C-alpha cells in the first residue's frame, strides 16, 4: 500500500503555499528524471573484455497531501479569462485580497478563510496513470464527505468540481472548485471546499468562468457553523480509501 505524507499548513499566504508545492513537485519530478538515467555495471566478460549492461536506479518517489487555508485571494488558471475578475487593483486592496495568475487548469476562483484547500502532490505512477480518473477521485472524496454531513452532491456534466442540484439549472450551485496541474504524471494544486466561507467574495468574480451558476458552502446549506477539523478527518478517511494509501 502506498505511503502518503500528510501535512497541514494551517492559514498560509497563497504564494508561500504555491512555492512550497512547487518545491515538492520539482523534487518528485527530478527523482523520476534521475530514475530514467541508466548507469552501467560490468556483468559479463568475453575474451577478457567487460561488457557493461545498463541498469536503472529505482529510487521511490514520495507522495504528499496538504491541507491549508488562505487569506483572501483570487487565482486564475491557464485557460482563464482575466475579465472574470470583476474588481480592479484598488478594490482588491480595499478587500484585503490578492490576485495571482497560476499554472493550474481552470478559470478564476476564490480562496479564503473558512475554506479547506487540499493539495495532493502525487506521483500517479504510484497509483494509476489516468488524469480523468484522478479528477473523478478528488470529486468523489468531497461527495462522500458531504454525504457524511447529509448534504447530497454530485457532478455537473462537462464541468469539474462538486455541485448541489447539478441537474437543475435554477438551483445548481458549486460547493467545491478544482484545478490541477500534472507533468510526468506528478500532480499539484487540487480542490477548495467551502465549509464556513464568506460567499460575498465570490461576488467579485465569475466563479470558474461560469456566469449562470451560484456558489454555496456547507454552513449555508446546514444553517450552522461546521467543525472544520471534523471535515478534514473525513476528507482524509475517504482519500486513503479511494487511493488505497496510508498517511504518515
Image (cartoon, helix red, strand yellow):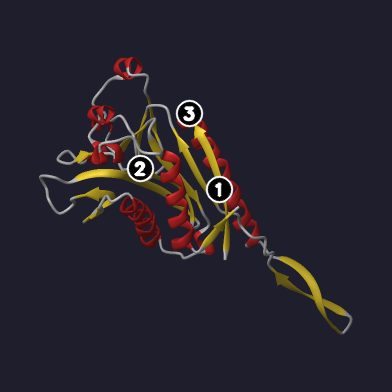
Find the residue positioned furthest to the right: 48
Residue 215 in the image: x percent, y percent? Answer: 23, 39
Question: From what the image shows, is residue 139 above or below residue 10?
Answer: below
Report how far apart the C-alphas of labels 1 and 2 lie in the structure: 18 Å
Residue 54 in the image: x percent, y percent? Answer: 71, 71
Describe the element under mark 2 as helix, strand or loop: strand
Ranked by sequence position, the earlier of labels 2 and 3 is: 3
Question: From what the image shows, is residue 181 above or below residue 68?
Answer: below
Find the residue positioned furthest to the left: 170
Q: Quadrant of residue 102?
A: top left
Task: Name the residue beneath numbered marker 1.
Answer: 6
State the count of labels.
3
Task: Name the residue beneath numbered marker 3.
Answer: 13
Closer to the camera in the image, 52 or 27:
27
Give me the residue at 17% from left, 46% from top: 172
Give me the residue at 36% from left, 23% from top: 97
- In the image, taking residue 91 as reference, residue 7 lies left or right, namely right
Ranked by sequence position, the earlier of labels 1 and 2 is: 1
* Circle nearer the viewer, 2 or 3: 2
> Which numbered circle lies on residue 193?
2
Marks 1 and 2 in Cβ contact (< 8 Å):
no
Report how far apart the C-alphas of labels 1 and 3 lie in the structure: 19 Å
Report how far apart the C-alphas of labels 2 and 3 lie in the structure: 17 Å
Q: Residues within 10 Å of mark 3 (few under 14, many from 20)?
A: some
- In the image, taking residue 141 as reference, residue 205 lies left or right, namely left
Ranked by sequence position, the earlier of labels 1 and 3 is: 1
Closer to the camera in the image, 41 or 186:
186
* Circle nearer the viewer, 1 or 3: 1
Amino acid at each position: 500500500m502506498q505511503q502518503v505524507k500528510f501535512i497541514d499548513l494551517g492559514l498560509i499566504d497563497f504564494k508561500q503555499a504555491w512555492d512550497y508545492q512547487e518545491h515538492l513537485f520539482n523534487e518528485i519530478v527530478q527523482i523520476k528524471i534521475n530514475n530514467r538515467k541508466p548507469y552501467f555495471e560490468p556483468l559479463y566478460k568475453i575474451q577478457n573484455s567487460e561488457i557493461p549492461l545498463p541498469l536503472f536506479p529505482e529510487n521511490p518517489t514520495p507522495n504528499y497531501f496538504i491541507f491549508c487555508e488562505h487569506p483572501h485571494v483570487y487565482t486564475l488558471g491557464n485557460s482563464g479569462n482575466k475579465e472574470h475578475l470583476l474588481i480592479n487593483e484598488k478594490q482588491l486592496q480595499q478587500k484585503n485580497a490578492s490576485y495571482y495568475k497560476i499554472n493550474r487548469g481552470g478559470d478564476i476562483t476564490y480562496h479564503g478563510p473558512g475554506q479547506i484547500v487540499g493539495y495532493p502532490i502525487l506521483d500517479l505512477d504510484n497509483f494509476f496513470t489516468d488524469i480523468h480518473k484522478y479528477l473523478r477521485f478528488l470529486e468523489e472524496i468531497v461527495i462522500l464527505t458531504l454525504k457524511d454531513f447529509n448534504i447530497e452532491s454530485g457532478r455537473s456534466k462537462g464541468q469539474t468540481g462538486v455541485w448541489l442540484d447539478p441537474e437543475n439549472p435554477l438551483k445548481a450551485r458549486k460547493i467545491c472548485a478544482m484545478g490541477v496541474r500534472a507533468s510526468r504524471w506528478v500532480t499539484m494544486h487540487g480542490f477548495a471546499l467551502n465549509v464556513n466561507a464568506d460567499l460575498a467574495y465570490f461576488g467579485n468574480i465569475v466563479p470558474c468562468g461560469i456566469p449562470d451558476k451560484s456558489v454555496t458552502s456547507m454552513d449555508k446549506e446546514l444553517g450552522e457553523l461546521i467543525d472544520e477539523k471534523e471535515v478534514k478527518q473525513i476528507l482524509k478517511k475517504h482519500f486513503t480509501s479511494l487511493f488505497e494509501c496510508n498517511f504518515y
